[in-house]
Every structure is written in C-alpha cells, then in structure tokens.
Amino acid sequence: MKKMTKKEKNEFKRILMEKKERIVHKLSTFINESKEVESNVAQDVVDKAESSYTKEFLLSLSDTERSHLLLIDEALRRLEKDSFGVCQLCGKEIGEKRLEALPWTPYCIICQEKAEQEAESQ
Ligand SMILES: [Zn+2]
C-alpha cells in the first residue's frame, strides 16, 4: 500500500483530536468537575479506563459516543504505529474516501458490510 505522508497523518490526527475533544467537551458539561475531567480524561481514555472516575465518565456517555471515543483513541494509536488506514480484519487498505468520511473506522467497507450482515442475521 502507498505510505501515508507525514502531512496526511497529521491531518488525520487533527481531525481525530477535534472530534474527540468535541465529545469530551460536550460530556464535561454534565459533570461538575468539568475542568478536571477534561484534562484527565481527554489525554487517554483507554489507559485510564481502570479508574472508577473514568468508568463513571464513560457510563455517562451514550453508547454511540462511547464507542466513538474508543474508536478515535484506537485510530490515534494506529497513527502512531503506522498501521492507520489498514483494515484490522483483513489487513487491506481502507479506501481514501472512507477514511475521509470515517477516519476512526478500523475496518474496510467489505469487512464492515460483512459484520453488519452478520449482526442482522443473528
Ligand atoms: Zn477488511
């Protein structure tokens, strides 16, 4: 697959961070110690998932927001590890258009559709 340039990576990182901040910020308004939540939780939700405070925070999220936040964190990790843009199931390249629309997606369109079909047939 073609290697992503540093510029492209930075751009995806910026988009992902923005999206993450928007979710975290929105949620912090539900919680009194909003400043503390923002600085603590925004850094790395997954690493801090052990603390009960973060668990509470995560529970206050809707399912969609929670899964989004985790997907975003995972995508940021993949950016660091140079595996961003590669389907986590089949290992093939995720289409550019798909990445632009859903930069946090871990799967290519084919695997995503397969997973959805399986979910429906259950
Ligand atoms: Zn795939």
Image (spheres, rainbow, N blue to C red):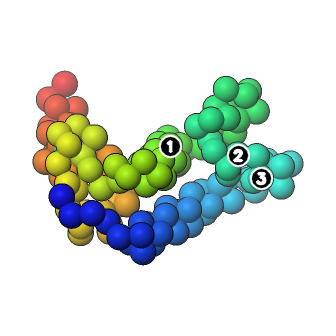
Which residue is pictured at 17% across the width and 48% down the height?
92
> Amino acid under label 2?
Val
Pick whichever of labels 2 and 1 is earlier in the sequence.
2
Within-10-Å neighbours for mark 1: few <14, some 14–19, many 20+: some
Quadrant in which the N terminus is drawn: bottom left
Within-10-Å neighbours for mark 2: few <14, some 14–19, many 20+: many
Tell whether circle 3 marks a residue whose Cβ is less than 8 angstroms from ligand 1.
no
> Amino acid under label 1?
Leu
Which residue is pictured at 22% across the width and 56% down the height?
94
Is residue 112 visible from the viewing direction of this image? no
On screen, residue 106 versus residue 119, left or right, reads right
Which residue is pictured at 76% across the width and 33% down the height?
53
Label drawn at residue 70: 1
- Counting from the top left corner in percent of width and height, residue 73 is at 51, 47
What is the total number of numbered labels drawn onto the structure image? Answer: 3
Tell whether circle 2 marks a residue whose Cβ is less than 8 angstroms from ligand 1.
no
On screen, residue 61 versus residue 52, left or right, reads left
Pick whichever of labels 1 and 3 is earlier in the sequence.
3
Tell me where residue 24 sits by quadrant: bottom right
Q: Are marks 3 and 2 in contact (CB under 8 Å)?
A: yes
- The answer for how far apart the CA atoms under marks 1 and 3 are is 17 Å
Q: Do the residues labelled 2 and 1 touch (CB within 8 Å)?
A: no
Label drawn at residue 39: 3
- The answer for how far apart the CA atoms under marks 3 and 2 are is 6 Å
Q: Would you name the residue on which mark 2 appears?
A: 41
- Counting from the top left corner in percent of width and height, residue 45 is at 62, 42
User: Which SS class for mark 3?
Assistant: helix
